[in-house]
Amino acid sequence: MTTTEVRASVGLASIFGLRMLGMFLILPVFALYAEHLPGGNNHTLVGLALGAYGLTQAMLQLPFGMASDKFGRKRVIYFGLALFAIGSFVAASATTIETIILGRVIQGAGAISAAVTALLADSTREEHRTHAMAMIGGTIGVTFAASLVLGPALYQYIGMHGIFAMTGILSLTAMAVVKWYIPDPLISSFHTETEASPAKLGDVLRDTQLLRLNFGIFSLHAAQMAMFVVIPFALRNAGNLDINHHWEVYLPVVLIAFILMVPAIIYGEKRAKLKQVFVGAVGLMLAAQLSMAASMHHFWGIVAALTAYFIAFNILEATLPSLISKIAPVTAKGTAMGVYNTSQSLGLFIGGVTGGWLSQHYGFSAVFMFSASLMVIWLIAALGMRPPPAVKTRMFHLDKMSADQAVLLNTRLRSLQGVYESTVVAEEGIAILKVAQQGWDEITATQLIEESKHGVS
């Protein structure tokens, strides 16, 4: 990577991290804080406050990405971060839970994920783009884990109003990072592998293998949001644990889950056993939900169930994007990821609202039975999933060429050993190949690419 590419990758990963930190910090403490607000004893409103941002985020992610093609990446990102900051300050000044819900709705309207990934694609060469995207994915995972520990600690010192205000300040800081740290790309263009195309949307929505994964990410985050309507109360009631000390539970649980996640992911990828690892993780998630339903009055039972939950969550959160990449057609990968991200946001909203309503009317255990029901459906869907091919995606830069030259090059690349799928996009100047993880004819592919640059036919 060049210095410019490193700056863009690090800077944009930090934008995701700052924004996600603002989203996640309130999760472990908000339900208990809401008790002190007018209307805060209504768990339906608590769940709505937690999940509200997911609805506007789901509605606006794809439109924001498309708008960035027309109005410019950074302009759209500034606008989204400004909305997020406004929503944060609205929530920080709130004295009722209804005002916090309004703030969360405005926060979610700053749906910049698609615009950020498009800017990343503008700022990195094809051969380094996958690594840059992995940096963003890793940042999100670390931010979520850190938020569970930092949320209760920050609440002790600055309170919920302070957390929301800090979130707004972080958003303004992110705008400064975009302005002065992230380089302006020389060329901004549409990228098949990172951006959604309306023309490909129908194909993606009809693909049953992708639909299984979209339902999976919906269920995973619906259960996550529903859980945090209840878990803070369970830790307080069963363990007599003050909210300021909840981090003492989350820290070891998250560390254990991360340590156990890594070998499972490596085993699945290296041994072409990703489906088995994936199905096992869904099964573990189901067991965790059932265990939490049965352990609401037993502190160590809750801790054990949380450990199982986070092990499963980390594995699934890491493998789902990998499965999307392996299964989605190379010409529709960006569209597939757009639908996937929208499904995730809808899960956050539905999970928060449903978890709050069930907790209000039927008690804590009903929340986990709802989540367990989602896991049963997901487990059945996962068992019927075709094993994903042991492939990886490679991208190559091309010089300008005619449509006929692109067709010829694509035919030659597709015939090479170990190439499962390929597409040459002449107008974007890229070749995207889905290839075997080991043993594919990379030497010949590179030669064909170089010959195309020199007009050799």
Image: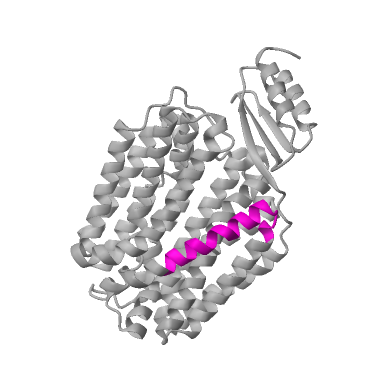
The tally of labels here is: 0
Residue that appears at 65% across and 65% down: 279
Tell me: residue 196, above or below residue 155.
above
Tell me: residue 379, above or below residue 273.
below
Dividing the picture into quarters, in which one does residue 296 lie? bottom left
Image spot of residue 345 (x, y percent):
47, 56
Magenta stretch holds residue 387: no
Q: Name the image quarter holding the C terminus.
A: top right
Image spot of residue 197 (x, y percent):
58, 38
Magenta stretch holds residue 262: yes
Q: Is residue 222 left or right of residue 201?
A: left
- Determine if residue 352 is in view: no
Q: Is residue 235 left or right of residue 413?
A: left
Q: Is residue 33 left or right of residue 359?
A: left
- In magenta, the rendered stretch is 253-275
Residue that appears at 52% across and 80% down: 291
Residue that appears at 26% across and 71% down: 244
- Determine if residue 170 is in view: yes
Q: Is residue 407 left or right of residue 184?
A: right
Image spot of residue 366 (x, y percent):
48, 81
Tell me: residue 236, above or below residue 279.
below
